[in-house]
Amino acid sequence: MTAESHHPFTTVIGLEVHVQLQTETKLFCGCVTTFGSSPNTQVCPTCLGLPGSLPVMNRLAFDLSLRAALALNCKIASFTKWDRKNYFYPDLPKGYQISQFDLPFSYEGHLEVIDPKGVFEPRNVRIIRVHLEEDAGKSMHDEAAGTADSRIDLNRTGTPLCEIVTEPDIRSPEEARAWLNELKLLLVYLGVSDCNMQEGSLRVDANVNLHIPQPDGRLAKTPIVEIKNMNSFRSVERALVYETERQWGEWQATHAEIGSMPKQTRGWDDSAGVTRGQRHKEESSDYRYFPEPDLVPVTVSEEQVAAVRATMGEPPAMLRKTLADRWKIPAYDADVLVNQGPELVEYFEDLAKKVGEGKVASNWMQQDVLRMLNERGGRIADFPVQPAAVADIIERVKKGDFDTGRGKEIFAAVLETGRPVDEVVAGLGIAAVDEGDLQKLCEELIAENPKIVADVKGGKEQAAGGLIGQAKRKNPNVNPGKVRALALELIRALP
Amino acid sequence: MPTQDEATPTLTREDVIKVAMLARLALSDTELSSLTEELSKIVGFVSQLSEINTDEVEPLAHPLDSQNVFREDRPVPSLTTADALRCAPRHDEECFLVPAVLGESGSA
């Protein structure tokens, strides 16, 4: 998969990410930003760009973007303003987008991504800037219907967006995917955005080219290509793998270098698995930015920055360490848990607290809760077996009522039936095996297995394992550990 | 903006054609000629500013001496779809209709 493992070049990738901020209303007006509503039901004179309307900045949108920038280790500008980015498109009713040009509210940050499996070295990706702007609407064209019209829905127009632009610091498609996962996790943990790609809350464009060392020591660079239309992080990775190979092929054929042609935009076709060149609009880069006269500038004091920082909570990178320390679990476990999002971490901590042993709780999370959650889909908050029930099962295993394997069956049954642990245990006939019954069972086994008894007597204690399978067949509720201990004790006591 | 010599700013016909295209203005040859001349004069007039030394002057971000105007994140009722579409030259029951838009949006 990694191109650089067999090709003599470095892949150079930079990302541009747009995330919708988790506000109730739009950036400049009080229309709600609910996804999936009927077309043009969330519009007003301001977001329709009607004459005489004026934008007023949403305070929460600004605070959330400030939070995102701080989490990305950005510097915060003490003075920031907005600008008009002028272009014509039917989904942009004003004829300009209110964005930030020369004085973005934040700049020069970084976010590191560490691969727990060590496939790539930890990568610190620098952030050029984070700025706050408004989204455009949607145009829909039904080519199959063969009509000459496009339909325009302006519900999304004016939704607050944070634009995050990285330096070209990423060196492989899988790094790009891993970094995006880390970014998404960070923004979800901080409550900045739900980062739902299906609903367009997070959109990614990627810039990529190759640096190819030449025999004379010079570094040849292929023309930069911007890839658009990637609808999942997996698509981003696939598109970058494809584009890397395509550029390498093109380089070998043409030796065309950066600067020999205008920057190219290519769209990712997910089903075909290829990028395709898009029509180049020569004028598209001429946006004629100028300061937005309808919005006054915003100033940010050190105190405000400190206040936002104080309410931010722990970013995922820190939370991984905290969880590992607090619950004495391996870094790998902490990574798995944190990567599932804040709701799952809350579930885990609740369980760990009740069980009193982090590692036991973590094992159950990974082997049972997560596995079933992934099978069923949905959110952990709606998962039918909550921490108290899991802790109850674990407690009974610890007491020796039944073994872990049986415990897992009970967990699955509780999940399936939706009934309390007590009832499931009773219903399955999984009652704790009485000491007297256990004694009787072991005596029977010893009588029936002279060979095993002889082996154990001869010093091969592991031979006792042969009794456990038989014990389970006689009574599925027996605890293997107890059977083993008692059987050994009885055998030793034999003359 | 079009590139120009700082001392004697002029606009070429090509500059005006480009700016007109960006603004989606269809100009006749006569209009192009007169606008090239007029716009050159305007740019020349404004360029008087470059004679002043502004090294110590902070760029003006906004003419009003006001900052930090915010609203709370509270919903306000939107227009009805019918009202929103009322002034549009063409629309169906829920959307604005425009000549076919194919290809990529120019949005950021």
Image: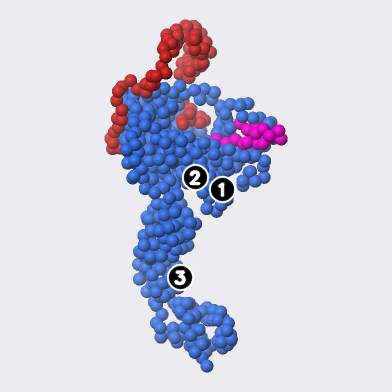
The numbered dot on residue A346 is none
Q: Chain of mark 2?
A: A
Q: Residue furthest bottom?
A: A495
Q: How many other residues sit within 10 Å of disc 1, few (<14), some (14-19) or many (≥20)? A: few
Identify the secondary structure beneath mark 3: helix
Can residue A17 be seen?
Answer: no
Distance (Cα) linking label 2 and label 3? 39 Å
Q: Is residue A167 magenta?
A: no
Q: Residue at x 57, y 84 (%)?
A: A459
Q: Residue furthest right?
A: A215
Span colored in magenta: A203-223
Q: Earlier in the sequence, mark 1 or mark 2?
A: 2
Q: How many other residues sit within 10 Å of disc 3, few (<14), some (14-19) or many (≥20)? A: some
Q: Earlier in the sequence, mark 2 or mark 3?
A: 2
Name the amino acid, label 2: Glu
The residue labelled by disc 3 is: A404
Instruction: Judge if badges 2 and 3 mark residues of a common chain.
Output: yes
The residue labelled by disc 2 is: A112
